[in-house]
Image (cartoon, rainbow, N blue to C red):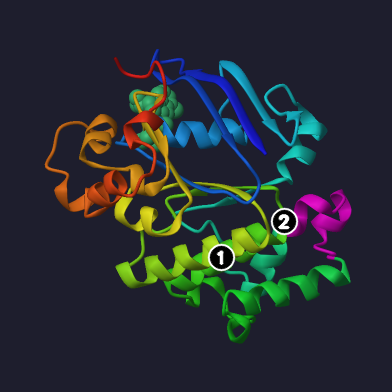
């Protein structure tokens, strides 16, 4: 379980990127983080793995407070947090297998990691994951020979190689065509459910996200302004997150379905105290 309490970040420039975010993501839940550019999505993800230092609040993963950790303790804690990037962040000249195995580097001691001496179980697990993401045939290919979708599959396998408790995913489909985007989202969500991970996906494509995730959280000006299931996103909540626009396409038919299905009022899921 990931628990953020009153998480805040003010950059040295004076920009308030996060303004007291309270959020819990249980194991096994896939959550999409949506919101306009500048809302604080990247900052939130980076404060969790401490690529950015929060200025206030706490970050706990399975009860362990992460925001004060330093040095070795921080390195150990980061093994529990996998990352998947829009730009894949693969080592292009290395093979698919080597890229996936690099997900284990955090578990090797200094010399073993320098010499890339992986344990035998690591190779077996890498093969299993590559099979699961449909890339067993490409095991020896160099990363720079792969398509975008294949690269993202390698990125997913590498992150899972780490055996994380939490997966942070930054715009996983932004560089992919619509069909590949759907395949990648489906694979990602299936694998995370199988492995009972808590997952936060920073994603711009609201329609794509709502087809696959369990929960959507909308950020605006560094605050949570929507927190609910995908069916709860209607024109009113989208306006709250992104501002005035004709949202009838994005809101789709779910608007009526939500209202008529006896489900709780989606507006009621909007965080208390956010945006007067
Ligand atoms: P998003 O990912 O939703 O687009 P960001 O987290 O990148 O939002 O940005 C949130 C706010 O923080 C914006 O006002 C942005 O200008 C500011 N910001 C982001 N990164 C930095 C930085 N390194 N230095 C100063 N301000 C930053």
Rendered view: 10 above or below 74: above
Percent position (x, y) of residue 89? 53, 56
Q: Residue at x 28, y 52 (%)?
A: 257
Badge 2 vs badge 1, beta-carbon distance below 8 Å: no
Could you say which is closer to the camera, residue 125 or residue 5?
Answer: 5
Percent position (x, y) of residue 26? 63, 42
Residue 39 in view here: no
In magenta, the rendered stretch is: 104-118
Could you say which is closer to the camera, residue 113 or residue 233?
Answer: 233
Foreground mark, 2 or 1, reads 1
Q: Is residue 34 left or right of residue 97?
A: left
Q: Main secondary structure of the magenta part?
A: helix
Rendered view: 130 above or below 197: below
Q: Is residue 40 left or right of residue 126?
A: left
Rendered view: 148 above or below 134: above
Q: Residue at x 56, y 61 (%)?
A: 90
Identify the secondary structure beneath mark 2.
loop
Q: Which residue is mark 2?
A: 162
Q: Residue at x 70, y 58 (%)?
A: 103
Queried on whether the Cβ of the residue with tag 1 lies below 8 angstroms from ligand 1, the answer reads: no
Q: Is residue 190 left or right of residue 74?
A: left
Q: Residue at x 26, y 30 (%)?
A: 240
Percent position (x, y) of residue 187? 52, 68
Could you say which is closer to the camera, residue 164 or residue 176?
Answer: 164
- Few, some or many C-alpha atoms within 10 Å of disc 1 (few <14, some 14-19, many ≥20)? some
Rendered view: 15 above or below 214: above
> Residue extending furthest bottom?
137
Percent position (x, y) of residue 48? 60, 33
Question: Which circle's residue, 2 or 1, is located before the other in the chain?
Answer: 2
Identify the secondary structure beneath mark 1.
helix
Q: Which residue is mark 1?
A: 190
Q: Let me know if residue 89 is in the magenta part.
A: no
């Amino acid at each position: 379980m990931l628990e953020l309490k009153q998480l805040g970040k003010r950059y040295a420039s004076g920009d308030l990127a996060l303004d007291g975010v309270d959020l819990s993501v249980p194991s096994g839940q896939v959550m999409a983080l949506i919101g306009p550019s500048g809302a604080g999505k990247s900052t939130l993800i980076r404060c969790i793995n401490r690529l950015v230092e929060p200025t206030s609040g706490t970050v706990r993963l399975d009860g362990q407070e992460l925001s004060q950790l330093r040095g070795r303790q921080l390195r150990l804690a980061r093994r529990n947090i996998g990352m998947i990037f829009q730009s894949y962040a693969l080592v292009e000249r290395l093979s698919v297998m080597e890229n996936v195995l690099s997900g284990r580097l955090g578990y090797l001691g200094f010399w073993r990691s320098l010499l890339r001496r992986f344990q035998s179980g690591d190779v077996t697990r890498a093969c299993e994951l590559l099979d699961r993401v449909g890339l067993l045939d490409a095991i020896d290919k160099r990363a720079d020979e792969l398509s975008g979708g294949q690269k993202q599959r390698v990125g997913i396998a590498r992150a899972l190689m780490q055996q994380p408790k939490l997966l942070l995913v930054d715009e996983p489909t932004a560089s992919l065509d619509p069909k590949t985007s759907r395949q990648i989202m489906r694979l990602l969500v299936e694998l995370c459910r199988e492995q009972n991970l808590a997952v936060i996906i920073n994603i711009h494509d609201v329609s794509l996200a709502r087809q696959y995730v369990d929960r959507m959280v909308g950020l605006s000006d560094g605050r949570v302004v929507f927190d609910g299931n995908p069916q709860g996103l209607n024109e009113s909540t989208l306006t709250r997150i992104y501002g005035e626009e004709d949202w009838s396409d994005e809101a789709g038919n779910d608007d009526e379905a939500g209202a008529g299905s006896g489900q709780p009022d989606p507006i009621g899921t909007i965080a208390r105290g956010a945006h007067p």
